[in-house]
Image (cartoon, rainbow, N blue to C red):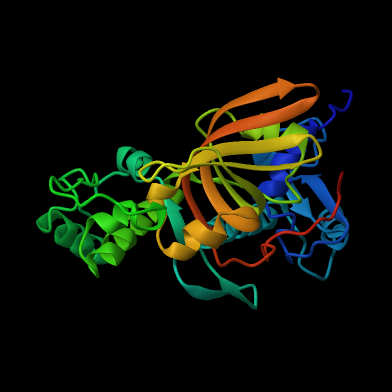
């Protein structure tokens, strides 16, 4: 039977799931996409695994006196490593404070912008137990949110004097604002954990892969340079157009400064050309003039990240 060529999109998906690392040693040099059952025509994801050159050779070698790298061992290692990758990607995209990943210091997300309306429509069980439940009960009893977690605009609200004091957080007394922000940060974390966002990095910035993976409705996490441009300047509605692009691939969306937390977010973090992290949902994708454009809805944007994820590398992989 003639060998079936491994589709490029499938190969890239396998590499992404493995964080561009060998499932045995987590090495990132000389990677191969290996067929676990050694049938090169069986191109299904369960039968594909990322191995470095050394472990790929071992997978094709039988030893009499030493332990062999059998299909069962490979499957077990693949399962464990993919679970680790998924867990670490959740840590990277949530506001969980300082932590260590793969032996290096890592500062996680600090959300400076949250799309309160969209988050309230997306989150489930706003009254969850634990710290989140205590925050919800405080905000509910203070009349800041309703039973579904939606922010309530006070009936008696003093007119904002400017953009800097016209945010949702300025609706409420001092010290109440951070509780509302903490509550919604928990909600964003819950969305991350339930939606498994695709992490777009330099390594995954590939047209074939993104076009195949990022269908409408897919959650996406980006950590890179963005261009911020004010398109409307009103006290209650200062809209910012946000875009990032490279190699004829572009992501674009809009955010309202009314949903930003803290003066720094409005005046410097999300202004001009700045590095930031963004959790967005794909609304649509458009092929235009040989350019692929993803039109998105923002969920949250943050600052305070490593410049590069410790999980990935830019190594090229081969097929066995």
The quarter of the rendered structure image containing the N terminus is: top right
- Which one is nearer the viewer's eye here, 37 or 34? 34
Residue 77 image-quadrant placement: bottom right
The image position of residue 37, as x and y in percent, is: 75, 42
Write the residue at 81% across / 39% down: 247
Q: Quadrant of the C terminus?
A: top right
Depicted 182 relative to depicted 13: above or below: below
Residue 89 falls in image quadrant: bottom right
- Say whether residue 49 is visible: yes
Residue at (65% x, 52% y) in the render = 75
Residue 188 left/right relative to 311: left
Using the image as rendered, state which of residue 86 and residue 190 is in the foreground.
190
Q: Is residue 182 above or below residue 12?
A: below
Q: Number of callouts in the render?
A: 0
Give left or right: position of 60 versus 155: right
Q: Residue at x 56, y 61 (%)?
A: 268
Q: Is 45 or 311 nearer to us in this picture?
A: 311
Instruction: Please state the horizontal and vertical placement of residue 279, each as a whole percent of the image.
Output: 52, 48
Give the image location of residue 128, x and y in percent: 23, 55
**Residue in the picture at 80% in, 46% down:** 33
Instruction: Give the residue furthest to the front.
Output: 161
* Up/down of 204 relative to 107, above or below: above
Residue 94 seen by the camera: no
Residue at the extreme left: 141
User: x, y percentage for residue 255?
Assistant: 48, 43
């Amino acid at each position: 039977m003639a060998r079936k060529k491994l589709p490029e999109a499938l190969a890239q998906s396998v590499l992404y799931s493995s964080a561009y690392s060998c499932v045995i040693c987590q090495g990132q040099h000389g990677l191969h996409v290996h067929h676990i059952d050694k049938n090169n025509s069986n191109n299904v994801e369960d039968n594909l695994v990322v191995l470095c050159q050394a472990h790929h050779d071992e997978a094709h070698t039988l030893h009499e006196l030493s332990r062999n790298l059998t299909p069962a061992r490979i499957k077990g290692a693949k399962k464990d490593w993919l679970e680790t990758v998924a867990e670490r990607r959740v840590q990277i995209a949530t506001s969980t404070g300082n932590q260590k990943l793969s032996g290096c210091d890592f500062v996680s997300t600090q959300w400076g912008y949250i799309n309160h309306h969209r988050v309230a429509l997306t989150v489930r069980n706003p009254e969850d137990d634990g710290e989140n439940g205590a925050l919800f009960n405080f905000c509910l009893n203070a009349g800041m949110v309703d039973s579904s977690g939606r922010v309530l605009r006070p009936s008696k609200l003093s007119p904002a004097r400017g953009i800097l004091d016209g945010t949702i957080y300025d609706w409420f007394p001092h010290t109440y604002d951070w509780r509302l922000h903490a509550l919604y940060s928990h909600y964003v974390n819950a969305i991350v954990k339930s939606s498994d966002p695709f992490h777009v990095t330099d390594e995954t910035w590939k047209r074939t892969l993104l076009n195949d993976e990022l269908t409408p409705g897919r959650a996406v996490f980006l950590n890179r340079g963005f261009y911020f441009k004010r398109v409307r300047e009103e006290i209650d509605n200062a809209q910012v157009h946000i875009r990032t692009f490279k190699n004829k691939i572009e992501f674009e969306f809009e955010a309202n400064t009314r949903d930003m937390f803290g003066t720094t977010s409005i005046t410097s973090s999300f202004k001009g050309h700045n590095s930031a992290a963004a959790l967005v949902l794909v609304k649509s994708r458009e092929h235009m003039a040989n350019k692929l454009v993803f039109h998105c809805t923002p969920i949250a944007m943050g600052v305070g990240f490593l410049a590069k994820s410790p999980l990935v590398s830019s190594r090229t992989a081969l097929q066995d």
